[in-house]
Image (spheres, coloured by chain):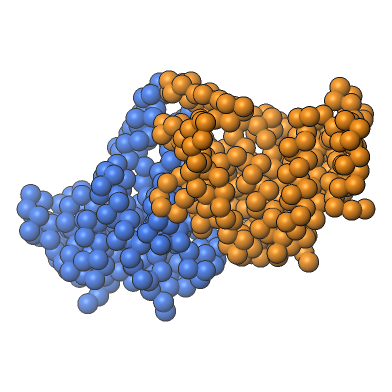
Chain colours: A blue, B orange
Amino acid sequence: MEQLYVIKIGGNIVDDETKLALFLNAFAAIDEKKILVHGGGKLATKMAAQLNVPQQMVEGRRITDAETLKIVTMVYAGLINKNIVAQLQAADCDAVGLSGADGNAIKAHKRVVKELDYGFAGDVDEVNAGFLHALLQQNLSPVLAPITHNGKGQLLNTNADTIAQETAKALSKFYDVSLLYSFEKSGVLLDAEDENTVIPVITKETYKDLKEKSLVFAGMIPKLDNAFAALDSGVRKVIIGKADNLQHLLNGEAGTSIINEQ
Amino acid sequence: MEQLYVIKIGGNIVDDETKLALFLNAFAAIDEKKILVHGGGKLATKMAAQLNVPQQMVEGRRITDAETLKIVTMVYAGLINKNIVAQLQAADCDAVGLSGADGNAIKAHKRVVKELDYGFAGDVDEVNAGFLHALLQQNLSPVLAPITHNGKGQLLNTNADTIAQETAKALSKFYDVSLLYSFEKSGVLLDAEDENTVIPVITKETYKDLKEKSLVFAGMIPKLDNAFAALDSGVRKVIIGKADNLQHLLNGEAGTSIINEQ
């Protein structure tokens, strides 16, 4: 099968003009098929402050009331997405920016209210792999903003990590997919304080071992559990690391590769 | 050749939730291939006021400084475009929202400064007919926001009427194109004060005659000149009228049809 990279960048890159420009040039230089998923960064929070829309964050997630939904739609699907696409086009990468509503790319439902009402937050139901596949076959590179829709006219604010993961899973039926999460650290570290302790490869077996010996930082466990879930759904490899050196991450010279077995 | 409708809606529809919903349902019901081009409406002006970014309008055109470009990118390509797409998807129309940067759909250059510096305003150089054609062939309906790019990473604010016209012209090599401008009046009127005086058909010959007899309202002349220029570039028909009854406009029961000859 043909190779596909699904690459997620977070706020630390989106917010930094120089880092973003370097990353986008490296992304444009990838010869294989590729999809970029971007988070929101601090711009939405800044815009909300300027517009006097109070923001409430719970465990790093934004409570999305109607006014906040307008802001994230403007900032993520408008300002950030279109500037990324224009920069990729300038670097000869034929990018096409999409929200989940466009081409019905990603359908979601409003998160069910349990202890907490997240408002217009969406949990992904289905990625339209056929649509994205058709774009990729035209040598287009989709750039996904973290906004989805419910198919009934409602836009929803959706976690970019989840979008990246669900997209990687759905496209595994057409491609040999590597899912890359850009991260503030150099990879999964044995010692959270020491960037030189990157674990280059984690398999299901070594993960079990690392967990038993309590060698994995607690905060990494949900991320790694998600990575193995993606592998179980057909994704070939999950890579976690600093996007500053994208080519090294992709060829395994940097970061942590998470694979089912060696 | 297959029929294609390029339909431009202006601020009077975009700003009115009820009118917009009615229009989008009618648009979704069109069986033929279709492209929607939307203007900006008053939302950008409102947003600029909330963000304390002073706006300068000259002859109905917005002077686009760097801060204003951010606002129109957010509002046109983000908020308005994605809400239109989500509503079309809900009406079973497989819409995909695009700026000119997406898929390099519309390339423009920054307007040359003469008496007046329009800032980041773009004049269209080229519409990527091949890209839009490929989407149409996948039964997708492109929804174009009035934001273009220069191919060097710069987004540009661009007149929606011009985008509609250039898109219609470029796609004439693949389709039998009708270009529809939604308008605040019922069509081209013989008496600007009387909505019952719509001229149903204007040809080059009758246009000459109407102008000689000073029967065309001066404000309409540039619009009509543009319409005939579009016909000279391969567009089959230009329709001007109220979008409230879209089906009647499309089948010639309402509005003014501008054609080369009867």
Q: Quadrant of the C terminus of chain A?
A: bottom left
Viewer-side residue, B162 vs B254:
B162
Q: Is residue B229 visible?
A: yes
Q: Position of residue A94 (x, y in %)?
A: 45, 61
Write the residue at 34% across / 30% down: A46
Q: Position of residue A51 (x, y in %)?
A: 42, 23
Q: Is residue A101 left or right of residue A78?
A: right
Q: Position of residue A192 (x, y in %)?
A: 10, 51
Write the residue at 73% across / 51% down: B230
Write the residue at 25% across / 75% down: A261
Q: Is residue B51 left or right of residue B1?
A: left
Q: Quadrant of the N terminus of chain A?
A: bottom left
Q: Is residue A216 left or right of residue B34?
A: left
Viewer-side residue, B161 vs B24:
B161
Q: Is residue B74 left or right of residue A240?
A: right
Q: Position of residue B108 (x, y in %)?
A: 52, 49
